[in-house]
Amino acid sequence: MAATWSDKAVGRPFGADQKRDSALKEQVEALLCQMTLEEKIGQMNQVAGSRDTTGAPANTEIEADVREGRVGSVFNAFGVDFTRELQKQAVEHSRLGIPLLFGYDIIHGFRTIFPIPLGQAASWHLEGIERAARIMAIEGAASGVHWTFAPMVDVARDPRWGRVMEGAGEDTYLTSLIARAQVRGIQGRDPGAIDTLAACVKHYAAYGAVEAGREYNTVDMSEWRLRSIYLPPFLAALEEGCASVMTAFNTLNALPATCHPLLLDQILRREWRFEGMVVTDYTAIMELEQHGVAANASEASRKAVNAGVDMDMQSSYFIKTLNDLVQNGQVEEARIDEAVRRILWLKAALGLFEDPYRYANDDREAECLLSDAHRRAAREQARESMVLLKNEGNVLPLNDRHKKIALIGPLGNTRRLIGSWHGNGDHNDTVTLSEGLANRLVEDAVILYAEGASNRIGDTDTSGIEAALELVRQADAVVLALGEDEADADEAASRADIGLPGAQLELARRVLEAAGDMPIATVLFNGRPLALTELDEIAPAILEAWWPGTEAGNAVADVLFGDVNPSGKLPMSFPASVGQIPVYYNAFNTGRPKGVDPKYASKYLDIPNAPLYPFGFGLSYTTFEYGALETTCSEIGLDDTLEVSLAVTNTGERDGIEVVQLYLQDVHASVVRPLRELKGFQRLELAPGTCERVTFRITPDMRGFLNAELEHMQEPGLFRVQIGGCSQSGQEIEFRVV
Ligand code: GLC
């Protein structure tokens, strides 16, 4: 029995209006009839653009190929002059003048860089995430980009994998809502607008589940887990009108995702009825040979195109082999036509046939890139992304009485705080923590900086620690700036040991010892959850800042000095030890849960089961109190919606934002169900002493799940509701569905 999905199957990308859509279709058909087979295949070929130092196309071969109609899209393509020049070769010098589609990885900023997506997710602020995506699209479009390879929606439960920095963490529901917000921000409401881009949801599918967290490694899971945990964010992005899909590098259940009929035909086309374009990841068709499912380029192309791939990123296998494959009957020309229709439709929807040069614009580029307004938005989101992990004795916030601040650590004076996928971002634009503190400090205050130790993996040199201690002894407050280098949580950057790299922990130990009773705050700049048990044992205050983007230093200073009250909540569990991985909040209970039998229980002999910091956790400079959870009734029918509500009070002395989280447990069902699942949240802004009543509606759809036959259904039975400021705590009630 094929699985069933929500009835919101996706159709045309962009949620295109039917009238405009039929006009586009006619335009595409009229063009398709004129195209030779070679020209059609040319549209399915995407190559990397590259520029010389002047910004002109460095790869002159690409110009010749473009003129011959052998290129449909160029990626790593941006810059008014570069894109205009290449577009001119296509439009004015190829036989049919079909415009090129320019793509680029604009993941969390184009020139103004926002926090890494994992940091953005920690804000739980969907409007802020949408605004960041809107701004990056405005900047990218002004520079001639048409299409971005975002959002990345890979649910991930293994922080050893470096690309967790690029997604929204471990939860399917939060990732799905963020995917929708990013698609809305990237594509806006009108695909033809000159400040919107086409989005590309990636990596389809389940790339975040690579075995052992090792990059590009095997993925194998039940179809139940695939459809319940990893696929819903893709459907969410497509329901939001996302224009395209990118296939993943990995295998899924013994088949590479780039030639996977279940993913590319059964689910994407038949169940979801998606009509947009599918592009592969970089050389993924070529890699079918490495995977061992293709003996040569021809077989690789045949398998990819017949499975449903429309565009080949950088393998050049389609352009080399598809003509012969059609001639010898191994690929139907109808399949080529179907792929080319989707590609041409996207170009038409973007308005490129009307005006191929409509996006790239010097004035708009000069006006909007890195504008003050964009920097302000980046700073605001960076503040909201930060998570206060610990604040023993209310060490934080610091205050203006501190006149000598010792800033110690390898991340204290670096501009490498914008993440690895930073588009056209320039490190020189980044505000360092040292600069941010200097901007914030009162006149007569000074900053004493020493690196102390490096954050290079494996660098155990501690010779710089003594000089750092010297500064600590002169100071009246200490800020430790520790973490990872941008390059160490990225594509092709998995880590087996996810502790603080280098000799940073030793540095922290020695500085904390030397600091005595002095206020000392540890700021972490990292791209993945780290194993921080030792640091947590000695550091009184820990602020997770991720890689905050262009305005990093200013945003961290805003939070350290309490100009902004931290409100972030973890979108991914921080393990107590790498040995726990995968550790995630929505786990099953098992038949022998810990705590029942002292010996025969699901536990370790040497480490706890619980993560150090759980999903949904984050402290504040104020405190919040949750009143008793109330409900309209304790028994409802299958089709009924239950309202639950409680009062949340700011019981401290500062304004604060609390992310109130709703978790649901289906206590008994026909398949095992997680101990809790996030089903809703609300960000409350509360002034000191004020109280707000929060109401959630628990709908039949929220109670639904996939049963053992992969049918989406709801069952009667006992349910448990938990509402609080973290996945592990809150007010609870039970209700029954009859
Ligand atoms: C990379 C990434 C993908 C990116 C593409 C183009 O290898 O896997 O996310 O969009 O290549 O740069």
Image (tube, rainbow, N blue to C red):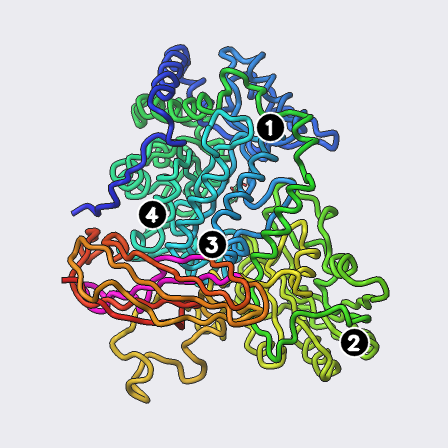
Q: CA distance from mark 1 to mark 3?
A: 28 Å
Q: Contact (CB < 8 A) between labels 1 and 2? A: no
Judge from the rendering whether residue 313 lies leftward or rightward of residue 360; answer left or right: left
Q: Is mark 4 within 8 Å of ligand 1?
A: no
Judge from the rendering whether residue 375 lies leftward or rightward of residue 117; answer left or right: right
Packing grade of label 3 (10 A; few <14, some 14-19, many >=20) is: many
Q: Which mark is residue 476?
A: 2
* Circle nearer the N terminus (1, 3): 1
At x 45%, y 44%, the residue is 181
Residue 227 percent across, percent down from the top left? 29, 51
Q: Which residue is mark 3?
A: 168
The residues colored magenta run 657-682
Outermost residue, right side? 444
Asked whether 426 falls inside the magenta stretch, the response is no
* Circle nearer the N terminus (2, 4): 4
Q: Which residue is mark 1?
A: 144
At x 33%, y 81%, the residue is 594
**As shown in the figure, which amino acid type bears the numbered disc 2?**
Asp
Outermost residue, left side? 738
